[in-house]
């Protein structure tokens, strides 16, 4: 299974504000939906709380060391198998692997980035910053939306280091007069110095 991460940030690596997103960009959310549809998603407890429910057409694994997840219909979602709760990232990745092996390939989902995404079983880390920091060393591919602007907020993707990654593709668009780059990055394999 390939482990991916799907995140959006501004030019200063800002990703969050007051528990939500710093921007309102429906087209970016549509891109997120396309990339994640049909997949198993792993998220931190605060990100799950901000979304408020399992995302349709996807399986959500929430990581919470405290295990204190509550919310509307929480028990129902667990019973339906749309939501899982894990107390460690390692448990969540193992569960994602098991669940991904059971999912049927959906050729309508994902994006065509020219790198045969659909031939890979792929689970995705979808934030927030705390979970990304723990998961980053294990991530093979990063779907990174970069909004070329400066927003205000309180949460940053400091764990992203450009030098660890090699760009596979980029699509530049304008959303609400903002320059936005949809980047697909794979982990760079550095040659070992002797
Ligand atoms: N721009 C984007 O693409 C994007 C994507 C996602 C989220 N966000 C934003 O990011 C912000 C939330 O990020 P955040 O960093 O504050 O929170 P987060 O990572 O979503 O959640 C943090 C919580 O998740 C649990 N957790 C995280 N890592 C863990 C680990 N390795 N092991 C066990 N439990 C772990 C802990 O839960 P317990 O306290 O229950 O133990 C922790 O308190 C929000 O503003 C959200 O809107 C932005």
Image: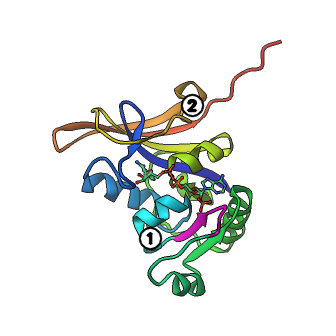
Give the left or right position of residue 28, taking residue 40 as reference.
left
User: Which numbered disc flags the more N-terminal residue, 1 or 2?
Assistant: 1
Q: CA distance from mark 1 to mark 2?
A: 28 Å
Which contiguous range is marked in magenta? 59-67
Q: Mark 2 near ligand 1 (CB under 8 Å)?
A: no
**Is residue 139 in view from this perspective?**
no
Residue in the image at 52% along x and 82% along y: 77
Q: Which residue is mark 2?
A: 165
Q: Quadrant of residue 159?
A: top right
193 vs 113: above or below? above
168 vs 115: above or below? above
* The one of 23 and 192 positioned closer to us in this rendering: 23
Q: Position of residue 71 (x, y in %)?
A: 47, 77
Q: Quadrant of residue 97?
A: bottom right
Q: Assess whether residue 91 is covered by the magenta stretch.
A: no
Q: Position of residue 49 (x, y in %)?
A: 46, 66
Q: Which residue is mark 1?
A: 55
Callout 2 environment at 10 Å: few (<14), some (14 to 19), or many (20+)? some
Helix, strand or loop at label 1? It is loop
Q: Mark 1 near ligand 1 (CB under 8 Å)?
A: no
Residue in the image at 26% along x and 57% along y: 26
**Is residue 172 in view from this perspective?**
yes
**Quick one: quadrant of the N terminus?**
bottom right
Furthest toward the left, the residue is 177
Helix, strand or loop at label 2? It is strand
């Amino acid at each position: 299974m390939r482990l991916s991460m799907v995140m959006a940030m501004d030019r200063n690596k800002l990703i969050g504000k007051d528990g939500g997103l710093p921007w309102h960009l429906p087209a970016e959310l549509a891109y997120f939906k396309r990339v994640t549809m049909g997949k198993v998603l792993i998220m931190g407890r605060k990100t799950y709380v901000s979304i408020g429910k399992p995302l349709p057409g996807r399986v959500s694994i929430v990581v919470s060391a405290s295990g204190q997840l509550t919310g509307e219909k929480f028990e129902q979602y667990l019973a339906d198998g749309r939501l899982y709760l894990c107390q460690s990232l390692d448990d969540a990745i193992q569960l994602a692997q098991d669940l991904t092996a059971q999912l049927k390939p959906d050729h309508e989902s994902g994006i065509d980035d020219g790198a045969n995404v659909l031939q890979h079983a792929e689970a995705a880390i979808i934030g927030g910053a705390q979970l990304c920091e723990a998961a980053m060393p294990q991530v093979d591919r990063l779907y990174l939306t970069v909004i070329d602007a400066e927003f205000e907020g309180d949460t940053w993707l400091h764990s992203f280091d450009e030098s660890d990654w090699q760009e596979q593709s980029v699509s530049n668009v304008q959303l609400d007069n903002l320059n936005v780059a949809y980047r697909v990055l794979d982990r760079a394999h550095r040659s070992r110095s002797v």
